Image: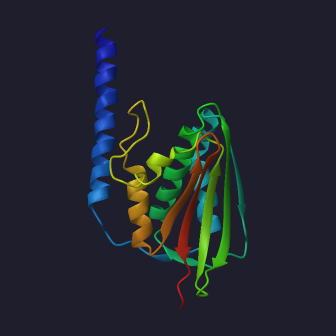
Amino acid sequence: DKKEHLRTVERETLRAREILKNLLDFSRRKPPQLVNADMGMVVQDTIPLIKGQAKLSNVVITTSCNNSLPQVSIDVDEIRQVFVNLINNACFAMPKGGSLDIRCRAERDSAGRQSVIVEFSDTGHGIPEEHLDKIFDPFFSARPDGGSTGLGLSISYMIMQNHGGRIEVESAVDKGSIFKVIIPVLDV
């Protein structure tokens, strides 16, 4: 009985530490350490970090990234954090397993500005329409078990803003979600 109480104390202490770390990350708005990078390589380098979580969740991850993507100026660690957050959320949205397709492409908008888009498309339970306008708010979590601090998407949103980019989402209940990470290609 005492051992179980100690395990509970330890588990909650670790959870509190994670919440505090997320709060500190959210409150520290440090400028990104930019380097020129290939987004396809960042995606490939991120997959091993979450492979275990995906396997436990019975989620199959496929990637399709064009080898001729233009380089973007990013803080690789911060963008990797965005990707990990999105992949973890996708795995949570598929408690009985499913698939996550990650695609990379370059695209020009109507003004001729080029961006690299990394799209995360899952077969999860989707996001109810009434939650879509809240998902990037700090501390908002739709998880019923309280297993989230509600900071992952907020931090990801802030990171993208610091990079001059954005995150867009399309979702339908019982059909899945598509998150698009859009990073502008800077003219040099």
- The structure residue drawn at horizontal position 73% and vertical position 69%, both measured from the top left corner, is 66
- The structure residue drawn at horizontal position 68% and vertical position 70%, both measured from the top left corner, is 105
Q: Is residue 69 above or below residue 59?
A: below
- Residue 133 x/y as whole percent: 43, 54
Describe residue 86's horizontal placement relative to residue 38 as left or right.
Answer: left
- Residue 166 x/y as whole percent: 48, 68
Describe residue 105's horizontal placement relative to residue 29 as left or right.
Answer: right
Most foreground residue, 67 or 6 = 67
- Indicate how the structure is coloured in the image: rainbow
Q: The N terminus is located in which quarter?
A: top left
- Residue 179 x/y as whole percent: 57, 57
- The structure residue drawn at horizontal position 52% and vertical position 52%, both measured from the top left corner, is 86
Q: Quadrant of residue 14?
A: top left
Most foreground residue, 85 or 9 = 85
**Res. 59 visible in picture:** no
- Direction top: furthest residue: 1
**Res. 8 visible in picture:** yes
